[in-house]
Image (spheres, rainbow, N blue to C red):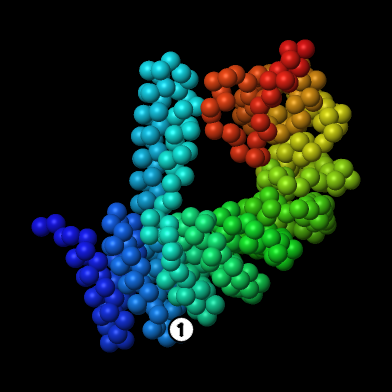
Amino acid sequence: NVVEPAERAAALSALGALVAEEARAEELPDALRLAVSLLAEPSRCVRAAALGLLDAAFKPMRKDLYPLHAHTLAEALEHIADSRGMARTRQARGAARAAAAKATTQGEEPVGAARAAFAETSATPLLPALCSAPGPAPLLPPLLGALMTGSPEAREAAAKALETLVTLTPPPVLKAHAVQIAGPLIRILSDRFGPGVKAAILGALRALMAAHAAVLRPFLPQLQTTFIRAVADGSRSVRLHGCRALAALAALSPRVDPLLTELSGTLTKAGVDGAVRLACAFALGAALNALTAAVPSAAISANVAAALRARMNDPNEDERMMGVAAIALGALSRFLPPAEAEALCTELAATASDSRVDGGLRAAHAAALGALCRAAPLPALVAQRAKLVSAIEKCAKDEDEVGSRQAAARAAARLLYRLTPPTAAATREQPPPPSWPAQPSVDEAAALSA
């Protein structure tokens, strides 16, 4: 028999009253899993009752008991996020196919219509119960309490649950709770905890920056210091999360010269561990790609370029380090004046296509060419396109170095994209991400045929 939504809501309310009693504490984890799973229900009254159950369970609870439920909430939120994400992807693919079919029958270009439909559908909020007040409010006290006072395992679970909760909540609803979430995360990150706790908190802060950048702007200097320290951490997981967090921070920062100076200084500092130096180069490239509001000064750009060249051209350097430094150097090219960008094109093309150069160095310069074709100012690419095409062709024929051939394929695709004049049909496609330079405008198309 089908149970009516009103009956289900009444049952949830009764269950909330029962599990609020300390004598029934052993039944609480199952009730919490049930309540979280029902936050995605189509019926509004069932969703409201599920939030009410969570509120009834945690409001009378002693704060020292919050950490006991961090793992249960983290697992339940992760499960519903995975299931909703897969359902959303299936919906978006169906919408894309329908939009492409409709565009085809109308004689229009189908790719742009499909991409627009996919993006519109996939942007739908994931968890309906969190799309209106009270939003995530019933879940915040136990998670923040576990984050502040729990064991390292409970703190890690709470931070992961907060990251999931932030991604499941629409920004307008999250705005009222963003400061409440950010404060404990920043305080805990500055303490001495294990790699798992640090990585989880960095992930939660990065999600919060993506959802509500304005809330964290007052904390940018403190966060920059903390994130740079994470990049130099002994744990690979913490270093990776630190690099990603620095990229998100660079997109918000009004001044990036101090950040770039500190990262590039680590590349040339003696006695730095190789893994830390590699992470700094990776963070440097990620930050350069993410920059939107700020532009590095000419002096800082020159210093960064010198540090990256030193790592690329060091014969004793690890090949991974050479490749990461090369990609960061290519990303830097979008901030160079056209004349300097042209000189960099010539330098990279000459080394990448020189068969007398060591194979690892050729591959690194070929990777830098690919990044440069993605980021450099359009006038520089137009002026140097003959050299670029010739170098890419030679790299594609490099029989001894597979890295050069792979980089040549990427560089060719990126150069073709940048040098292709836009068409009317292409304007319906989704715009590229901020780190990917846009196609030349119609006014610039004449320059491409010169």
**In the rendered image of this protein, does residue 423 appear above or below residue 357?**
above
Which residue is denoted by mark 1 in the rendering? 63
Label tally = 1
Q: Can residue 401 be spotted in the picture?
A: no
User: Residue 245 location in percent, x, y?
Assistant: 63, 56
User: Residue 376 location in percent, x, y?
Assistant: 75, 32
User: Residue 338 location in percent, x, y?
Assistant: 83, 29
Q: Residue at x 62, y 28 (%)?
A: 410
SS category of the residue bearing label 1: helix
Q: Can residue 208 be spotted in the picture?
A: yes
The amino acid pointed to by label 1 is Lys
Q: Residue at x 39, y 83 (%)?
A: 61
Give the quarter of the figure containing the C terminus. Answer: top right
Q: Residue at x 38, y 74 (%)?
A: 55
In front here: 271 or 290?
290
Q: Residue at x 69, y 24 (%)?
A: 441
In front here: 262 or 88?
88
User: Residue 292 location in percent, x, y?
Assistant: 70, 44
Q: Splitting the image into 4 quarters, where does residue 262 fall? A: bottom right
Extreme-right residue of the structure: 299
> Dot 1 surroundings within 10 Å: few (below 14), some, or many (20 or more)?
some
Give the quarter of the figure containing the N terminus. Answer: bottom left
In front here: 276 or 156?
156
Q: Would you say 387 lies left or right of 59 here?
A: right
Extreme-left residue of the structure: 1
Q: Would you say 221 lies left or right of 195 here?
A: right
Q: Splitting the image into 4 quarters, where does residue 249 fall? A: bottom right
**In the rendered image of this protein, does residue 102 appear above or below residue 225?**
above
